[in-house]
Amino acid sequence: MTEVAHTPRDFTPRVFSGIQPSGGLTLGNYLGAIKRFVDMQKGDFETIYCMVDLHAITVWQDPATLARNTRELCAGFIASGIDPEQSILFNQSQVPEHAQLAWIFNCVARMGWLNRMTQFKDKAGKNRENASVGLFAYPALMAADILIYHATHVPVGEDQKQHLELTRDIAEKFNHDFKTPFFPITEPVIEGTATRVMSLRDGSKKMSKSDASDMSRINMTDDADAIAQKIRKARTDPDALPSEPDGLGDRLEARNLVNIYAALSDLSVEDVLRDVGGKQFSEFKPILAELAVAKLSPISGEMARLMQDPAEIDRILGRGAERARAIAAPVLAQTYEIVGMVASK
């Protein structure tokens, strides 16, 4: 193996994260991801946010629906406060370096690592033999998404921690095999009071667009009336709210609604319960509904406005892809050099 000399580096503080454009953006996506993306945009990081459309096709997607969902997700990012001038905002397929680095990482990652990925087991279910190769291998693409930008931090939910651990394993093995500290060991950022928003009908299940009941979730396209109605109809228990977090115990639905209120109001759970402890849900739900409508209905309205001009959304995504490639292309070129790929130009 030819060694390529690379001195240790200080990596630029850089955040990367992405969401699949699989349709049906929910309150869970907003509180668990997009709102946090907006907050990190205000920090001391370069922020890169992506619609990961290559990941979406690991399961069948109708082409016209995928295109619409990609634009709608972009509209959701912008309406929520992502500034496409301040952050880099693009869809993954317009930056081919993601897929090119993923092939290198397919050759670095070990089968045993991918076999341990619980999300493949969950998504493939009992029909594993008919699942796509992409569904099995996509954690290597996820690692490439992050490391093609030398991202130092990734905001993740609890259910994505395993994939980030794989990203760190791939970076460490690449650096070790090629004897160069080329890729950063990316740090997870897990914070906030509602990083995992649960169903409004069953507090033991994650809020999901795939739930058969539309009343189980708040869609980011819901209008004010729908938002308020879903909160009023949310499942609860007959007891009053406690004054301290310990009092929530195993009251899953109560905990979920309090967490949602805390996240929307940028308060801690302790502060919320200090204010609403002792109230019945008949008193608390109208307060939560009013807050949710105030925070979310402007986002749904702006999303609808943005979706009236898909050409402008495409322009934003194209400009974002140009900016992303300006970072990604040199990283890929250096990776190829380290691996020993011959470049004639």
Image (tube, rainbow, N blue to C red):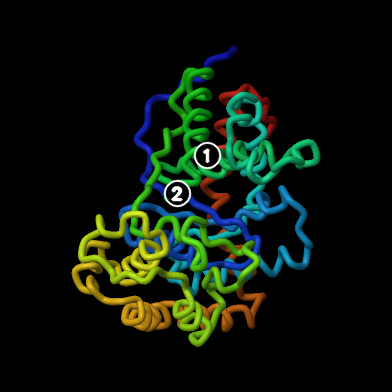
Name the side, left or right, on which 287 lies relative to 48. Answer: left
Residue farthest front in this picture = 238
Q: Closer to the N terminus: mark 2 or mark 1?
A: 2
Q: Quadrant of residue 40?
A: bottom left
Examine the rendering and report whether any part of residue 321 can be seen. no
Examine the rendering and report whether any part of residue 194 can be seen. yes
Q: Position of residue 83 (x, y in %)?
A: 45, 68
Disc 2 + disc 1, Cβ < 8 Å? yes
Residue sitting at x 64%, y 40%: 120
Residue 301 position (above or below residue 255): below
Q: Position of residue 140 (x, y in %)?
A: 61, 36
Q: Nearer the viewer, residue 124 or 213?
A: 213
- Mark 2, residue position: 156
Q: Of helix, strand and loop, which one carries label 1?
A: helix
Q: Nearer the viewer, residue 308 or 169?
A: 169
Could you tell me the amino acid type at mark 2?
Answer: Val
The span from disc 2 to disc 1 (Cα, nearest Å) is 10 Å
Question: 10 Å neighbourhood of mark 2: few (<14), some, or many (≥20)?
Answer: many
- Mark 1, residue position: 163
Residue 131 position (above or below residue 25): above
Q: Position of residue 167 (x, y in %)?
A: 51, 35
Q: Position of residue 277 (x, y in %)?
A: 23, 70
Name the side, left or right, on which 23 lies relative to 324. Answer: right
Residue sitting at x 56%, y 44%: 145
Residue farthest bottom in this picture = 225
Residue farthest top in this picture = 1
Q: Of helix, strand and loop, which one carries label 2?
A: loop
The quarter of the picture where the C terminus appears is top right
